[in-house]
Protein backbone atom coordinates (compact mmCIF):
# COMPACT_ATOMS: atom_id res chain seq x y z
CA UNK A 1 0.00 0.00 0.00
CA UNK A 2 1.01 3.59 -0.56
CA UNK A 3 0.08 6.56 1.60
CA UNK A 4 -0.80 9.49 -0.67
CA UNK A 5 -1.71 12.14 1.87
CA UNK A 6 -1.77 12.68 5.61
CA UNK A 7 -3.66 15.48 7.36
CA UNK A 8 -3.20 16.10 11.06
CA UNK A 9 -5.13 18.59 13.17
CA UNK A 10 -4.64 19.24 16.91
CA UNK A 11 -2.81 16.00 17.55
CA UNK A 12 -0.24 16.34 20.37
CA UNK A 13 2.02 19.31 19.53
CA UNK A 14 0.91 19.30 15.89
CA UNK A 15 -1.67 21.98 15.17
CA UNK A 16 -2.03 21.51 11.47
CA UNK A 17 0.07 19.50 9.07
CA UNK A 18 -0.50 18.25 5.56
CA UNK A 19 1.97 15.79 4.07
CA UNK A 20 2.13 14.48 0.53
CA UNK A 21 4.62 11.66 1.00
CA UNK A 22 7.05 10.22 -1.48
CA UNK A 23 6.07 6.73 -2.62
CA UNK A 24 9.31 5.29 -1.26
CA UNK A 25 11.31 7.17 1.32
CA UNK A 26 10.28 9.99 3.64
CA UNK A 27 12.71 11.42 6.17
CA UNK A 28 11.59 13.71 9.00
CA UNK A 29 14.36 15.46 10.85
CA UNK A 30 14.62 17.99 13.62
CA UNK A 31 15.94 18.37 17.18
CA UNK A 32 14.36 16.61 20.17
CA UNK A 33 10.78 17.27 21.20
CA UNK A 34 9.66 18.83 17.89
CA UNK A 35 6.93 16.29 17.06
CA UNK A 36 8.67 13.64 14.96
CA UNK A 37 7.53 10.68 17.04
CA UNK A 38 4.11 12.33 17.39
CA UNK A 39 3.80 12.31 13.62
CA UNK A 40 4.66 8.59 13.34
CA UNK A 41 2.30 7.86 16.22
CA UNK A 42 -0.51 9.60 14.32
CA UNK A 43 0.18 7.56 11.16
CA UNK A 44 0.38 4.35 13.21
CA UNK A 45 -3.11 4.93 14.61
CA UNK A 46 -4.57 4.29 11.13
CA UNK A 47 -3.73 0.60 11.69
CA UNK A 48 -6.50 0.60 14.29
CA UNK A 49 -4.05 -0.43 17.01
CA UNK A 50 -3.33 1.54 20.15
CA UNK A 51 -0.36 3.88 20.31
CA UNK A 52 3.02 2.14 20.18
CA UNK A 53 3.93 4.44 23.08
CA UNK A 54 1.25 2.90 25.25
CA UNK A 55 -0.59 6.24 25.41
CA UNK A 56 -4.25 6.68 26.28
CA UNK A 57 -6.64 8.18 23.71
CA UNK A 58 -7.18 11.29 25.83
CA UNK A 59 -3.45 12.15 25.69
CA UNK A 60 -3.55 12.74 21.92
CA UNK A 61 -5.53 15.96 21.89
CA UNK A 62 -3.36 19.04 21.64
CA UNK A 63 -3.14 20.82 24.99
CA UNK A 64 -5.68 23.65 25.16
CA UNK A 65 -8.01 22.08 22.57
CA UNK A 66 -10.77 19.50 22.96
CA UNK A 67 -10.74 17.70 19.63
CA UNK A 68 -8.69 17.01 16.59
CA UNK A 69 -8.48 14.54 13.75
CA UNK A 70 -6.08 12.65 11.56
CA UNK A 71 -6.96 11.78 8.01
CA UNK A 72 -5.22 9.81 5.30
CA UNK A 73 -5.69 8.98 1.66
CA UNK A 74 -3.99 5.77 0.63
CA UNK A 75 -3.90 3.28 -2.17
CA UNK A 76 -4.31 -0.39 -1.36
CA UNK A 77 -5.17 -3.49 -3.39
CA UNK A 78 -5.93 -1.38 -6.42
CA UNK A 79 -8.34 0.96 -4.64
CA UNK A 80 -8.21 4.54 -3.37
CA UNK A 81 -9.11 4.56 0.31
CA UNK A 82 -9.66 7.21 2.91
CA UNK A 83 -9.44 6.76 6.66
CA UNK A 84 -10.16 9.27 9.36
CA UNK A 85 -9.85 9.15 13.12
CA UNK A 86 -11.45 11.79 15.29
CA UNK A 87 -9.38 12.49 18.37
CA UNK A 88 -11.01 13.41 21.66
CA UNK A 89 -11.69 11.58 24.94
CA UNK A 90 -11.80 8.48 22.72
CA UNK A 91 -10.89 7.71 19.15
CA UNK A 92 -13.63 7.39 16.54
CA UNK A 93 -12.74 5.88 13.17
CA UNK A 94 -14.17 6.20 9.66
CA UNK A 95 -13.30 4.31 6.52
CA UNK A 96 -14.29 5.83 3.18
CA UNK A 97 -16.71 8.06 5.05
CA UNK A 98 -18.44 5.22 6.90
CA UNK A 99 -18.37 5.21 10.67
CA UNK A 100 -16.74 2.08 12.13
CA UNK A 101 -17.85 0.27 15.27
CA UNK A 102 -14.39 0.73 16.80
CA UNK A 103 -10.95 1.93 15.70
CA UNK A 104 -9.85 -1.73 15.83
CA UNK A 105 -12.03 -2.33 12.76
CA UNK A 106 -9.32 -0.56 10.73
CA UNK A 107 -7.05 -3.58 11.30
CA UNK A 108 -5.98 -5.11 8.02
CA UNK A 109 -7.19 -2.07 6.06
CA UNK A 110 -4.18 0.13 6.73
CA UNK A 111 -1.06 -1.99 7.31
CA UNK A 112 2.08 -0.72 9.00
CA UNK A 113 4.98 -1.93 11.05
CA UNK A 114 6.66 0.38 13.52
CA UNK A 115 10.17 0.29 14.84
CA UNK A 116 11.12 2.50 17.76
CA UNK A 117 14.19 2.66 20.01
CA UNK A 118 12.63 0.55 22.75
CA UNK A 119 12.22 -2.35 20.29
CA UNK A 120 15.82 -3.21 21.07
CA UNK A 121 14.18 -5.01 23.99
CA UNK A 122 13.27 -7.74 21.46
CA UNK A 123 16.90 -8.80 21.58
CA UNK A 124 18.02 -7.47 24.95
CA UNK A 125 15.23 -8.37 27.35
CA UNK A 126 13.69 -11.58 28.65
CA UNK A 127 11.77 -14.16 26.59
CA UNK A 128 8.28 -12.78 27.21
CA UNK A 129 8.97 -9.86 24.83
CA UNK A 130 9.95 -12.29 22.06
CA UNK A 131 6.94 -14.51 22.68
CA UNK A 132 4.67 -11.48 22.43
CA UNK A 133 6.31 -10.47 19.15
CA UNK A 134 5.92 -13.99 17.82
CA UNK A 135 2.30 -14.33 18.88
CA UNK A 136 1.29 -10.93 17.52
CA UNK A 137 2.98 -11.68 14.20
CA UNK A 138 1.22 -15.05 13.98
CA UNK A 139 -2.21 -13.52 14.81
CA UNK A 140 -1.89 -11.23 11.83
CA UNK A 141 -1.51 -14.14 9.44
CA UNK A 142 -3.61 -16.79 11.17
CA UNK A 143 -6.55 -15.22 13.00
CA UNK A 144 -7.47 -18.68 14.39
CA UNK A 145 -4.36 -18.57 16.53
CA UNK A 146 -6.00 -16.00 18.85
CA UNK A 147 -8.52 -18.53 20.12
CA UNK A 148 -5.91 -21.27 20.56
CA UNK A 149 -3.71 -18.92 22.59
CA UNK A 150 -6.66 -17.83 24.68
CA UNK A 151 -7.63 -21.40 25.55
CA UNK A 152 -4.05 -22.34 26.28
CA UNK A 153 -3.39 -19.35 28.54
CA UNK A 154 -6.58 -19.93 30.45
CA UNK A 155 -5.75 -23.61 31.00
CA UNK A 156 -2.28 -22.70 32.34
CA UNK A 157 -3.80 -20.14 34.72
CA UNK A 158 -6.39 -22.65 35.92
CA UNK A 159 -3.76 -25.34 36.36
CA UNK A 160 -1.56 -22.94 38.34
CA UNK A 161 -4.46 -22.12 40.65
CA UNK A 162 -5.41 -25.79 41.06
CA UNK A 163 -1.93 -27.15 41.76
CA UNK A 164 -1.44 -24.54 44.48
CA UNK A 165 -4.57 -25.68 46.31
CA UNK A 166 -4.37 -29.39 45.56
CA UNK A 167 -2.19 -30.07 48.59
CA UNK A 168 -5.14 -29.24 50.84
CA UNK A 169 -7.83 -30.27 48.38
CA UNK A 170 -6.82 -33.58 46.74
CA UNK A 171 -10.15 -33.59 44.90
CA UNK A 172 -8.61 -30.97 42.61
CA UNK A 173 -6.26 -33.58 41.17
CA UNK A 174 -8.84 -34.83 38.70
CA UNK A 175 -9.37 -31.25 37.52
CA UNK A 176 -5.66 -30.92 36.88
CA UNK A 177 -5.98 -33.84 34.44
CA UNK A 178 -8.57 -31.80 32.54
CA UNK A 179 -6.33 -28.71 32.45
CA UNK A 180 -3.35 -30.82 31.41
CA UNK A 181 -5.34 -32.19 28.48
CA UNK A 182 -6.28 -28.62 27.41
CA UNK A 183 -2.67 -27.53 27.70
CA UNK A 184 -1.44 -30.47 25.64
CA UNK A 185 -4.09 -30.08 22.94
CA UNK A 186 -3.60 -26.34 22.43
CA UNK A 187 0.10 -26.32 23.31
CA UNK A 188 0.84 -28.69 20.43
CA UNK A 189 -0.96 -26.38 18.01
CA UNK A 190 0.91 -23.35 19.35
CA UNK A 191 4.23 -25.12 18.85
CA UNK A 192 3.23 -25.97 15.26
CA UNK A 193 2.32 -22.35 14.45
CA UNK A 194 5.45 -20.99 16.10
CA UNK A 195 7.66 -23.50 14.30
CA UNK A 196 6.18 -22.48 10.98
CA UNK A 197 6.58 -18.77 11.72
CA UNK A 198 10.15 -19.18 12.95
CA UNK A 199 10.93 -21.04 9.72
CA UNK A 200 9.73 -17.95 7.83
CA UNK A 201 11.92 -15.79 10.07
CA UNK A 202 14.89 -18.07 9.37
CA UNK A 203 14.45 -17.35 5.67
CA UNK A 204 13.89 -13.58 5.90
CA UNK A 205 15.84 -12.20 8.85
CA UNK A 206 19.37 -13.33 7.89
CA UNK A 207 18.96 -11.81 4.40
CA UNK A 208 18.00 -8.43 5.84
CA UNK A 209 20.66 -8.56 8.52
CA UNK A 210 23.44 -9.30 6.04
CA UNK A 211 22.25 -6.32 4.01
CA UNK A 212 22.41 -4.05 7.04
CA UNK A 213 25.86 -5.32 8.01
CA UNK A 214 27.22 -5.24 4.42
CA UNK A 215 27.58 -9.02 4.47
CA UNK A 216 30.13 -8.77 7.25
CA UNK A 217 28.03 -10.49 9.87
CA UNK A 218 25.52 -13.28 9.89
CA UNK A 219 22.51 -13.55 12.13
CA UNK A 220 21.08 -16.95 12.98
CA UNK A 221 17.74 -17.66 14.55
CA UNK A 222 16.60 -20.73 16.38
CA UNK A 223 13.46 -21.75 18.19
CA UNK A 224 14.37 -22.37 21.84
CA UNK A 225 11.53 -24.74 22.46
CA UNK A 226 10.70 -25.47 26.10
CA UNK A 227 9.33 -28.90 25.23
CA UNK A 228 8.62 -30.61 21.93
CA UNK A 229 5.04 -31.36 20.93
CA UNK A 230 5.77 -35.11 21.14
CA UNK A 231 6.96 -34.98 24.74
CA UNK A 232 4.55 -32.35 26.03
CA UNK A 233 2.03 -34.70 27.62
CA UNK A 234 4.63 -36.88 29.29
CA UNK A 235 6.78 -34.03 30.61
CA UNK A 236 3.82 -32.07 31.90
CA UNK A 237 2.71 -35.09 33.94
CA UNK A 238 6.22 -35.70 35.17
CA UNK A 239 6.54 -32.10 36.32
CA UNK A 240 3.34 -32.11 38.34
CA UNK A 241 4.91 -33.01 41.68
CA UNK A 242 7.50 -30.22 41.40
CA UNK A 243 4.90 -27.78 40.05
CA UNK A 244 2.73 -28.45 43.13
CA UNK A 245 5.52 -27.02 45.28
CA UNK A 246 6.01 -23.87 43.26
CA UNK A 247 2.43 -23.33 42.10
CA UNK A 248 3.72 -22.67 38.59
CA UNK A 249 3.38 -24.77 35.44
CA UNK A 250 6.97 -25.32 34.38
CA UNK A 251 6.46 -27.11 31.07
CA UNK A 252 4.89 -25.80 27.86
CA UNK A 253 5.17 -23.19 25.11
CA UNK A 254 4.51 -20.35 27.59
CA UNK A 255 8.19 -20.93 28.39
CA UNK A 256 9.43 -20.82 24.78
CA UNK A 257 12.03 -18.40 23.49
CA UNK A 258 13.81 -17.43 20.27
CA UNK A 259 17.61 -17.35 20.20
CA UNK A 260 19.52 -14.91 18.05
CA UNK A 261 23.19 -15.33 17.41
CA UNK A 262 25.50 -13.06 15.47
CA UNK A 263 28.50 -14.80 13.92
CA UNK A 264 27.76 -17.74 16.17
CA UNK A 265 27.62 -15.82 19.45
CA UNK A 266 24.49 -14.94 21.46
CA UNK A 267 23.28 -11.48 20.41
CA UNK A 268 21.49 -11.02 23.72
CA UNK A 269 24.57 -11.69 25.84
CA UNK A 270 27.39 -10.38 23.69
CA UNK A 271 25.95 -8.18 20.95
CA UNK A 272 26.90 -4.49 20.82
CA UNK A 273 24.15 -1.90 21.05
CA UNK A 274 24.33 -1.36 17.27
CA UNK A 275 24.20 -5.10 16.57
CA UNK A 276 21.20 -5.55 18.83
CA UNK A 277 19.44 -2.63 17.20
CA UNK A 278 20.22 -3.97 13.72
CA UNK A 279 18.95 -7.41 14.73
CA UNK A 280 15.72 -5.98 16.16
CA UNK A 281 15.21 -3.87 13.03
CA UNK A 282 15.80 -6.92 10.81
CA UNK A 283 13.21 -8.80 12.79
CA UNK A 284 10.60 -6.07 12.32
CA UNK A 285 11.33 -5.72 8.60
CA UNK A 286 11.12 -9.49 8.25
CA UNK A 287 7.71 -9.39 9.93
CA UNK A 288 6.50 -7.02 7.20
CA UNK A 289 8.03 -9.19 4.48
CA UNK A 290 6.40 -12.35 5.83
CA UNK A 291 3.05 -10.62 6.16
CA UNK A 292 3.36 -9.59 2.53
CA UNK A 293 4.28 -13.06 1.30
CA UNK A 294 1.57 -14.79 3.32
CA UNK A 295 -1.32 -12.38 2.93
CA UNK A 296 -0.38 -10.21 -0.05
CA UNK A 297 -0.66 -7.00 1.96
CA UNK A 298 2.27 -4.63 1.76
CA UNK A 299 2.73 -2.69 4.97
CA UNK A 300 4.35 0.71 5.28
CA UNK A 301 7.34 1.01 7.63
CA UNK A 302 7.48 3.63 10.38
CA UNK A 303 11.02 3.85 11.71
CA UNK A 304 11.51 6.10 14.70
CA UNK A 305 15.04 7.21 15.52
CA UNK A 306 16.77 4.15 14.09
CA UNK A 307 19.78 6.07 12.84
CA UNK A 308 21.39 6.73 16.18
CA UNK A 309 23.85 3.98 17.10
CA UNK A 310 24.13 2.79 13.51
CA UNK A 311 27.38 3.39 11.66
CA UNK A 312 27.27 5.17 8.26
CA UNK A 313 27.14 1.90 6.28
CA UNK A 314 24.13 0.67 8.27
CA UNK A 315 22.48 4.08 7.96
CA UNK A 316 23.00 3.90 4.22
CA UNK A 317 21.22 0.54 4.12
CA UNK A 318 18.25 1.91 6.03
CA UNK A 319 18.03 5.04 3.88
CA UNK A 320 18.66 3.58 0.47
CA UNK A 321 18.13 -0.17 0.43
CA UNK A 322 14.74 -0.78 1.91
CA UNK A 323 13.16 -1.08 -1.49
CA UNK A 324 9.90 -2.83 -0.94
CA UNK A 325 8.08 -0.57 1.44
CA UNK A 326 7.07 3.02 1.69
CA UNK A 327 9.15 4.24 4.62
CA UNK A 328 8.60 7.08 7.11
CA UNK A 329 11.73 7.60 9.12
CA UNK A 330 12.71 10.15 11.76
CA UNK A 331 16.14 11.33 12.79
CA UNK A 332 17.71 14.22 14.69
CA UNK A 333 20.83 14.83 12.72
CA UNK A 334 20.21 16.45 9.30
CA UNK A 335 23.59 15.12 8.15
CA UNK A 336 22.00 11.64 8.26
CA UNK A 337 19.94 12.68 5.28
CA UNK A 338 22.72 13.90 3.02
CA UNK A 339 23.27 10.42 1.62
CA UNK A 340 19.64 9.90 0.75
CA UNK A 341 19.58 8.94 -2.92
CA UNK A 342 15.85 9.34 -3.52
CA UNK A 343 12.82 10.43 -1.58
CA UNK A 344 11.54 13.45 0.30
CA UNK A 345 13.01 15.24 3.31
CA UNK A 346 10.85 17.16 5.78
CA UNK A 347 12.13 19.38 8.56
CA UNK A 348 9.97 19.35 11.69
CA UNK A 349 10.06 22.28 14.05
CA UNK A 350 7.68 22.86 16.90
CA UNK A 351 5.00 20.63 15.39
CA UNK A 352 5.22 22.22 11.96
CA UNK A 353 6.78 21.18 8.69
CA UNK A 354 9.34 23.79 7.66
N1 LIG B 1 -1.27 16.39 23.90
C1 LIG B 1 -0.25 17.19 23.65
N2 LIG B 1 -0.43 18.50 23.33
C2 LIG B 1 0.61 19.32 23.06
N3 LIG B 1 1.90 18.93 23.06
C3 LIG B 1 2.15 17.64 23.36
C4 LIG B 1 1.10 16.71 23.65
N4 LIG B 1 1.65 15.50 23.88
C5 LIG B 1 2.99 15.67 23.76
N5 LIG B 1 3.29 16.94 23.42
C6 LIG B 1 4.62 17.54 23.19
O1 LIG B 1 5.23 16.90 22.10
C7 LIG B 1 6.64 17.00 22.28
C8 LIG B 1 7.33 15.69 22.00
O2 LIG B 1 7.14 15.36 20.70
P1 LIG B 1 7.87 14.09 20.09
O3 LIG B 1 7.18 13.80 18.83
O4 LIG B 1 7.98 13.00 21.08
O5 LIG B 1 9.31 14.69 19.84
P2 LIG B 1 10.48 14.17 18.91
O6 LIG B 1 10.55 15.17 17.79
O7 LIG B 1 11.69 14.24 19.77
O8 LIG B 1 10.16 12.80 18.46
C9 LIG B 1 6.91 17.37 23.72
O9 LIG B 1 7.44 18.66 23.75
C10 LIG B 1 5.55 17.29 24.36
O10 LIG B 1 5.39 18.27 25.34
MG1 LIG C 1 11.08 11.05 19.07
Image: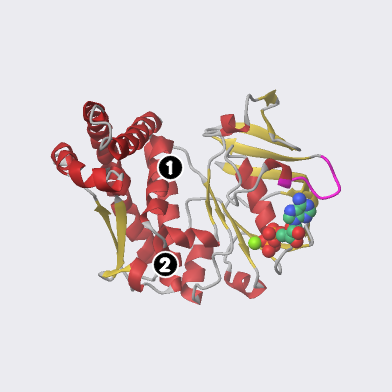
Quarter the C terminus occupies: bottom right
Front in this rendered view, residue 181 or 89: 181
Seen as rendered, the residue at the extreme right is: 64
Q: Which label's residue is closer to the chain start, 1 or 2?
A: 1
**Residue beneath label 2, please?**
276
Ligand 2: does it lie within 8 Å of the C-beta at label 1?
Answer: no
Mark 1 and mark 2 residues within 8 Å of each other at the beta carbon:
no
Residue under the point 41% across and 47% down: 132
Front in this rendered view, residue 59 or 15: 59
**Residue beneath label 1, please?**
136
Drawn side of residue 203 relative to residue 330, left or right: left
Q: Is residue 162 magenta?
A: no
Magenta range: 59-66
Secondary structure beneath dot 1 equals helix
Drawn side of residue 105 relative to residue 234, left or right: right
From the viewer's perspective, is residue 24 above or below residue 305? above
Amino acid sequence: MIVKKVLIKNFRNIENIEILPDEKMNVFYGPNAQGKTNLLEAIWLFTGAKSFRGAKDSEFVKFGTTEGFIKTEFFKDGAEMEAEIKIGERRKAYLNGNSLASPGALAGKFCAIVFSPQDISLIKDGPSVRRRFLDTAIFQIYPKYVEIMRKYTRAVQQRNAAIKDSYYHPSLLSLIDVFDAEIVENGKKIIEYRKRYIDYLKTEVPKIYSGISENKESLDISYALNCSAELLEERLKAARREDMKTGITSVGPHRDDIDFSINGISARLYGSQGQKRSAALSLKLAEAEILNKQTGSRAIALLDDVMSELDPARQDYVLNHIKDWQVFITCCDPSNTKNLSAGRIFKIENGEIK
